[in-house]
């Protein structure tokens, strides 16, 4: 039964000490998703630190530096299952210097949980993380107003945060925003409904996550299959002529008999069969990993893309991108970087910084052209060869890129094609 459940990926974000790790610990603890040895280890650590009860944040703070400082530095991934759904959690850092890690954790998420301290309300980091969630086109945003126990579970404090957040988020492209008053420390409205906030008539957090409609989050219209490698078995004489193009379906649906076009060459063919490790299938859709066999023998290599003849991505060398700079070293003017887009890798150059975004006001700064860590800006990029692209708003899989420093092989930026 669980194999047929939908998988929901969600990320948590918010400012320092808003309680992200405690919230995830509470979710795992109250939903009985923690192994006994884990629980025993955390209980022992909590006692050693002098805590009266279990320090729930320790369930996610895995790095030694994090445990010692009591903060989240890296993206911590956790997995748990309820009778209704499977979950992958990305617990992302709150410190401003680790904003780049939030981009990493949120890039594949169906939902974002934005934590707000009920005492402090909407602050700059709340806006920064909400704006990144908007940029990354995360379909569902759940704003959890935490630490309600410290404001005497006041409905007035809850409404005040909602008004402030809605005033800010009205400038962003967020489709679905929900607000839940919680106390992660005490468990109010996390897994179980709170008895301290009778004025709140909505569902607790876990029920909300279990019932989010995510089927329509995936692009099933634009058929895109970036080729990763060519399968040519050599050992089996009976199957020596097999030639399959392997990769992961980025979007859309493919079926045997479909007419397809290979980009960038433009050759047409039909799908003969679609194979998986378990055998042939009648259809393939995102995010399935498959091997597509065509009726015609066409020269196809890694980085090419199989699409529909009447629905093609654009093949462009000059691309406008909303870029998040992730590296502590600033961008070098007109320097060459490796650009990775699906399975395609080319050399690229940042030609121009069009504007930078002021996270606090969401205003555009056309004067400042320097790109430093955590800066979000719109740039023009030129590649050595065309990339087969869609806009990120239409297709997250084929609308995203990363830039890599050729000398260090470090990822320096992540971008959304506009």
Image (cartoon, helix red, strand yellow):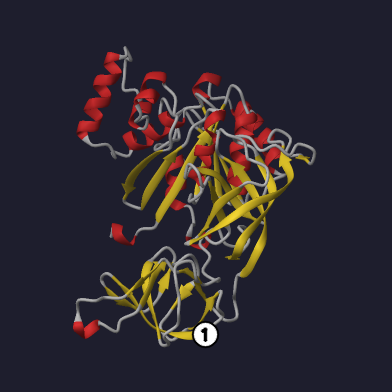
Q: Is residue 310 above or below residue 79?
A: below
Residue drawn where x is 38% and y is 48% of the image: 87
Q: Quadrant of the C terminus?
A: bottom right
Q: Residue at x 35, y 29 (%)?
A: 63
Query: How many numbered circles are shown?
Result: 1
Q: Is residue 75 left or right of residue 31?
A: right
| Viewer-side residue, 191 vs 268 | 268
Q: Please give the residue where the numbered disc 1 appears in the rendered image.
A: 268
Q: With 105 as the anchor, is 355 left or right in this view?
A: right
Residue 58 position in % (x across, y down) = 34, 27
The image position of residue 388, as x and y in percent, is: 58, 67
Judged from this view, the residue extending furthest toward the right is 367
The residue located at (35%, 53%) in the rendering is 84
Q: Quadrant of the N terminus?
A: bottom left
Q: Helix, strand or loop at disc 1? A: strand
Q: Is residue 93 above or below residue 407?
A: above
Q: Position of residue 180 (x, y in %)?
A: 53, 37
**Residue 4 visible at all:** yes
Asked whether 31 or 11 is in front, the reply is 11
Q: Is residue 172 above or below residue 152?
A: below
Neighbour tally class for label 1: few under 14, some 14-19, many 20 plus, Cα within 10 Å: some
- In the displayed structure image, the side of residue 70 where residue 330 appears, left or right: right
Q: Position of residue 243 (x, y in %)?
A: 34, 79
Q: Is residue 122 visible?
A: no
């Amino acid at each position: 039964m669980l194999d047929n459940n939908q998988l929901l990926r969600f990320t948590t974000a918010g400012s320092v000490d808003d309680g992200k790790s405690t919230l995830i610990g509470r979710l795992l603890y109250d939903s009985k998703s923690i192994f006994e040895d884990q629980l025993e280890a955390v209980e022992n650590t909590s006692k050693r630190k002098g805590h009266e009860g279990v320090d729930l944040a320790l369930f996610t703070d895995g790095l030694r530096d994090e445990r010692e400082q009591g903060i989240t530095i890296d993206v911590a991934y956790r997995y748990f299952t309820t009778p209704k759904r499977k979950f992958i959690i990305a617990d992302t850092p709150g410190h401003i210097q680790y904003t780049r890690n939030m981009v990493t954790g949120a890039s594949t998420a169906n939902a974002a949980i934005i934590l707000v301290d009920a005492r402090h309300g909407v602050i700059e980091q709340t806006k920064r993380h909400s704006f990144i969630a908007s940029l990354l086109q995360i379909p569902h945003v759940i704003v959890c107003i935490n630490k309600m126990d410290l404001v005497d579970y006041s409905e007035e404090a809850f409404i005040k945060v909602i008004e402030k957040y809605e005033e800010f988020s009205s400038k962003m492209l967020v489709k679905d925003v929900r607000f839940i008053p919680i106390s992660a420390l005490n468990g109010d409205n996390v897994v179980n409904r709170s008895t301290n906030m009778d004025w709140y008539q909505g569902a607790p957090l876990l029920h909300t996550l279990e019932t989010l409609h995510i089927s329509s989050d995936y692009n099933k219209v634009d058929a895109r299959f970036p080729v990763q490698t060519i399968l040519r078995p050599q050992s089996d004489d009976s199957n020596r002529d097999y030639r399959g193009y392997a990769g992961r379906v980025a979007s859309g649906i493919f079926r045997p008999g479909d007419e397809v076009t290979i980009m960038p060459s433009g050759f047409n063919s039909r799908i003969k069969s679609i194979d998986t490790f378990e055998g042939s299938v009648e259809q393939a859709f995102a995010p399935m990993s498959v091997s597509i066999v065509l009726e015609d023998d066409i020269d196809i290599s890694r980085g090419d893309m199989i699409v529909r003849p009447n629905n093609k991505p654009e093949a462009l060398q000059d691309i406008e991108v909303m870029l998040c700079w992730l590296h502590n070293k600033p961008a070098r003017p007109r320097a060459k970087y490796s650009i990775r887009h699906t399975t395609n890798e080319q050399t690229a150059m940042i030609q121009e910084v069009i504007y930078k975004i002021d996270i606090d006001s969401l205003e555009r700064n056309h004067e400042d052209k320097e790109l430093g860590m955590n800066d979000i800006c719109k740039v023009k990029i030129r590649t050595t060869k065309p990339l087969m692209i869609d806009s990120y708003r239409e297709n997250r899989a084929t609308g995203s890129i990363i830039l890599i420093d050729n000398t260090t092989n470090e990822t320096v930026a992540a971008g959304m094609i506009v």
